[in-house]
Image (cartoon, rainbow, N blue to C red):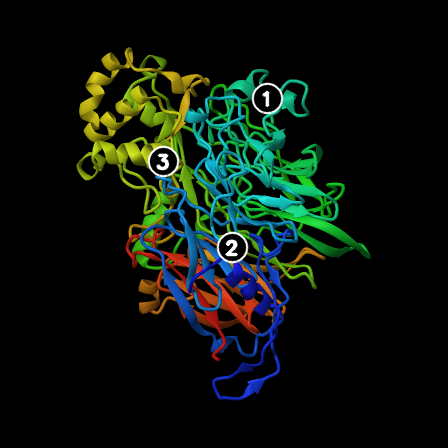
Amino acid sequence: MALRDGRLIRRYVGLALTGLLITTTAGQSTAISAPRQDWPVYGGASAGDRYSPLDQINRTNVKSLKQAWRIDTGPGGLQDSPIIVGRMAYVLTPKQVLLALDGATGKQIWSFDPGVTGVLPSRGVSYWTDGKSDRRILMGAMGALWALNADTGKPISSFGQAGQANMREGLGSDPAATPVFMTTPGSIYKDLIIVGFRTSETPPAAAGAIRAYDVRTGKLRWTFNTIPRPGEVGYDSWPKTAWRTAGAANNWTGMVVDQARGIVYAPTGSAIPDFIGENRKGNNLFANSLLALDANSGKRIWHFQTTHHDIWDRDLPSPPVLLTVKHKGQSIDAVAQASKPGFVFLFNRATGKPLFPIQERAFPKSDIPGEQASPTQPIPQKPAPFARQTLTADMLTTRTAEAHSWAVKAFASLRSDGPYVPFGLDRETVVFPGFDGGAEWGGQAVDRKTGVFYINSNDVPWLAKLRKAATNSDAGSGSSIYEQQCAACHGTDRKGSGKDFPDLSTAGSRLTSPELNAIIVGGRGRMPGFPQLSSANLEALISFLRQGPAAAASDKAASASVEASIFTAPTPTYVFTGYKKFQDPDGYPAVKPPWGQLSAIDLNTGAYLWQVPLGEYPDLVAQGIRNTGSENYGGPIITAGGIVVIAATIFDRKIRAFDSKTGAQLWEEALPYAGNATPATYAIDGRQYILIATSGARDRTGPQGSAYVAYALPN
């Protein structure tokens, strides 16, 4: 199938305008021909509501869904939510190669390889057109933003430098050593693409900035500094020099745009270090905030901070959603933001006024010298949290008598006093829901007609603790660099935690120095790259990882000759000892189910319509233990056919459809790998499809690989 001058693509787009009759498996024609409907934006539309008006697949026939096509994309992880424009589906491989596929067959039309070496999560691409002949795909790859011809996949030479803009420039630091990674697609407004970025979660990190680029030229049009500079609003919520030394407070989750009002809504994450705030006293605006910015200029219209002076890594984990609700007898255009603790904040999108009361509730002080936790945190009074908030003894697992006995003993040594309890040095503190939420990057879907909000969540506790950091005299040593840059994820003992945070105590026997170098600089999976490490610091860190304690004896002597350039920001006095799930000896959550849920919340009233467990563990199912819920990543979509479609679950590797009114499960299908992504739905030639990215990266004990799978009703 040759592609010449884009004629084939234009023919595809023309064909997609025509509705056709569908033939059922019984051989009878049906009159429910689907209209043309694309999925041209990450989140389905600029509002991010993941709603489709298609209803060919509906409550009555969803049980008949069958695989329409599949394309395998090699080893690695996929979190991509595809976009579909006309007949073309644009998808990413684990190596961040962009493929243009025929959305009806999966046949490849073209591919583009940006040539990146890091393998970080990438959740999609953006589409822009002038409404005539200029059609572009905007694609982030590591620290670059590419502009490609949507018909051919060729870079557009007039954009930036030979088709790419360097996202590491313009942030006040050396671009070669600035940790900036494009993992979530930008938002389109007129002729602008508005973007955030992922950065390091340890010092030094790039200072958060939300930026708008010209889609034609790649030139920067405006910047909003999320760590305010002198004279900017919010500057007094930080130490005076923080704008030079602090980092993060970045938008890594993506944004949504009110196209009519010209407002972009951007949620932000925590400032670094994630768990130690002694060197960033104050509330730290605009970290952990929902920002409403003028999309034309980047000027702040309003903001709301959901966590003050975050020392719990309570990033706003997903884009918000725009919807219209009935409130006190009026129709209100609103914006809803979900959070890791399991809250939903609902605001008038024009004014920022909360539609339900938000209480500033008092929480404990920190007993860490030098730490000044915020005395209060904002807690929405409606809706109720969609995840549990406090672990108590009566919630401990009863899966087996042995597991319960273990949990009771372990729980006795923990501090479990609810949310926003500062971490201490003497014992571990329960974080519930855990560091991955509550809400996670998958976000939510909203029924445009009813204002009902559908969200999946994790509901398992994690544990946290701090300890004294290495002395400043060891600042350049490999062990100290590891402690500051790596220990938060892999533990101060290098033992890691579960499948997400690998054991590095044996890294030297498993990986060569060049392999370690590539992973550290470029990143892999959940781990961002560390281009900010100087060559000497990188060498010291690799030596420590390969030699472990054997290298410690020579660390102190060697540190004097090692560059300490990564410690230009104040070095924290204390460090986080590492992520740790509260699991029983068999590896299951040490709390009673549900361990993952799907919730339907009426945002007109704040009332729950239903909550159901999401996911299962196959080994427990074999023992007759069902409906536990499980860890899940990715989000739902909803259609006019009355179905909520979601994959997300790691261990059972299934995609499911639920009745949007009742929560009853209507269909499920085993996937080749876990669908840790958000589906898309679209129609071509009168046939509706549901497309999901799958991969085995989050469960190394399961099948490995990645694939896109499309479902449709039988022809």
Q: In this view, does 149 lie to the left or right of 52?
A: left
| Pointer 1 local density, CA inside 10 Å: few below 14, some 14–19, many at least 20 | many
Pick whichever of labels 2 and 1 is earlier in the sequence: 2
Q: Label 3 to label 2, Cα distance in Å? A: 30 Å
Question: Hey, what amino acid is under mark 3?
Answer: Gly
Mark 1 secondary-structure assignment: loop
Identify residue for label 1: 238
Q: Position of residue 186 (x, y in %)?
A: 56, 43
Q: Mark 3: give few (<14), some (14-19) or many (20+) Cα within 10 Å.
A: many
User: From the viewer's perspective, is 433 left or right of 605?
Assistant: left
Along the line of sight, the residue nearer the viewer: 618 or 136: 136
Kindly identify the residue that appears in the image at 53 percent across and 64 percent down: 87
- Between the residue at mark 2 and the residue at mark 1, the CA separation in whole angstroms equals 47 Å
- Image height check: is 284 above or below 585? above
Query: Up-down: is 640 above or below 377?
Result: below
Q: Position of residue 226 (x, y in %)?
A: 60, 30
Residue 216 x, y percent position in the rendering: 60, 40
Q: Is residue 397 left or right of residue 432?
A: left
Disc 3 is placed on an element classified as helix
Q: Nearer the viewer, mark 3 or mark 2?
A: 2
Identify which residue, 639 or 656, lies in the foreground. 639
